[in-house]
Image (tube, rainbow, N blue to C red):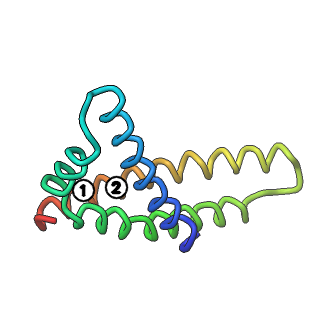
Amino acid sequence: MLISLPLLAFVGMLSGLVGGAMVATLSLDISITQFIATLQKDVSVTHFLVGLSKAPVFAFVIAVIGCLEGFKVSGSAQSVGAHTTSSVVQSIFMVILIDALAALFFMEMGW
């Protein structure tokens, strides 16, 4: 998780940039060079690094929640389903909560 989630975040960021460039070019009549120039002017590398720095934290939290819920499973398939659902809900909630706290922290730090 600590390796795959940051890689997935990196691929997601690149996909978002490529998708944004495609939409800007095809729908908004903005050239690729203008898109890249605006991107370089308005978005710093700090945003990219902040996003990648949060990914291992999220991975750790998701893995811990998944393991804790996995240890609670008893012998039935219904128990597996219930704890899987609980793990997913708890993980989503914790990622949203930690992301909100990180956003406040990074905003106060000026990053």
Task: Pick the quarter of the image with the N terminus.
Answer: bottom right
Q: Viewed as shown, does residue 68 lie left or right of 52?
A: right
Quadrant assignment, res 89: top right
Which mark identifies residue 103?
Answer: 1
Label 1 sits on what residue type?
A: Ala
How many angstroms separate mark 1 from mark 2 (CA)? 6 Å
Quadrant assignment, res 82: top right
**Mark 2, residue position:** 99
Element class at badge 2: helix
Residue 55, percent across and down? 43, 65
Element class at badge 1: helix
Label 2 sits on what residue type?
A: Asp
Residue 84, percent across and down? 69, 49
Pick the front one: 6 or 42 = 42
Task: Pick the quarter of the image with the C terminus.
Answer: bottom left
Relative to 39, residue 30 above or below: above
Residue 109, percent across and down? 12, 67
Residue drawn at point x = 46 percent, y = 53 percent: 12
Residue drawn at point x = 19 percent, y = 55 percent: 43
